Amino acid sequence: MDMKLDNVKNLYLKGIRDGHARAAVTEYTGERYTQHSTGVGDGVEGFVAFFESFIERCPVRDIEVLRSIVDGQYVFVHVHQNLNHGAAKWVTADLFDTDENDKIVEHWDVIQQDEENTASGRSMVDGATAIEDLDKTVANKALVTLFCQDVLVDGKLDTLSRYISEHRYDQHSPFIEDGLASLYEYLKTNAEQNHPVKYNKVHRIIGQGNFVVAFSHVLHSGEQWCVFDLFRIKEGKIVEHWDVQEKILPKQQWGNSGKF
């Protein structure tokens, strides 16, 4: 296993799932740990203060890392959390930066309640997990970069078929059905509203083989949101999509410098 990914999984699973918050954050982070999960303070003590309380409130923690991407210094994980025997279920997307020793130095995340009744009938987290086509990483990142700019930022819906497969598009976003036509209708309807979904800025795109994730600042009905979009690419087209979305809290409620 890549040491960066190993450190990330250990922070999540040993530190949070297994309840060893201080030991894990001390072992797996570097000289700094800059935090963008707005409810958590920076550094070791910020992590401990938040998660020791979380562990006490949630004594039963079934946490599973479902997908991961390692791209240079960055690691992304797609995680499902089932807390206190189903009392709360969350989907999280986490991005980590690492130092020259593969230790974690910065963290961004988005957390969303698991919506069990979705438009497509798929769950928010099922679907393909295997990383394939490592030789196509650069091309697949370029494809998603162009898709994000043309479609999500510039709203050029007539370009959708350049990027999305017309034969198969498995959708895990809770409110959109499968298929290219459904995505087109969803985006078109939003564009025609007075307060559409508008991707303001794509902050980072990372990928590994057939998986690419985009981390974005989104305006939705005049409100600020933070969104991770995870794509699976096959034969030069996007064939599967997951997302995790979180409304950004007012600045006075932040425990650190903010989501981005």
Image (cartoon, rainbow, N blue to C red):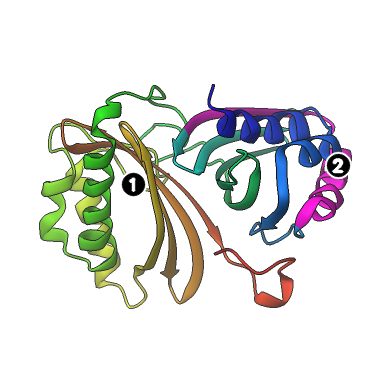
Q: Earlier in the sequence, mark 1 or mark 2?
A: 2
Please name the amino acid that badge 1 sits on: Ile
Name the residue tied to disc 1.
176
Name the residue tied to disc 2.
57
Q: Residue 192 vs residue 226: left or right?
A: left
Q: Is residue 134 visible?
A: yes
Q: Which mark is residue 100?
A: none
* Of 143 and 175, the residue lying toward us: 143
Residue 137 included in the magenta stretch of the image: no
Q: Residue at x 70, y 53 (%)?
A: 33
Stretch in magenta: 43-68
Please name the amino acid that badge 2 sits on: Arg
Q: Residue at x 20, y 61 (%)?
A: 150
Q: Position of residue 213 (x, y in %)?
A: 39, 45
Q: Is residue 86 visible?
A: no
Q: Position of residue 48 (x, y in %)?
A: 84, 47
Mark 1 or 2: in front is 2
For disc 2, the neighbor class at 10 Å (few under 14, some 14 to 19, many from 20) is: few
Q: Position of residue 116 (x, y in %)?
A: 52, 36
* Of 193 and 172, the residue lying toward us: 172
Q: Residue at x 33, y 46 (%)?
A: 176
* Of 54 and 10, the residue lying toward us: 10
In space, the residues marked 1 and 2 are separated at their CA atoms by 34 Å
Residue 53 included in the magenta stretch of the image: yes
Q: Quadrant of residue 252?
A: bottom right
Question: Compared with residue 233, is residue 247 higher up or lower down, i.e. above or below?
Answer: below
On-image quarter of the C terminus: bottom right
Residue sticking out furthest to the front:
100
For disc 1, the neighbor class at 10 Å (few under 14, some 14 to 19, many from 20) is: some
Question: Compared with residue 73, is residue 149 higher up or lower down, i.e. above or below?
Answer: below
Q: Residue 108 vs residue 197: left or right?
A: right
Q: Quadrant of residue 92?
A: top right
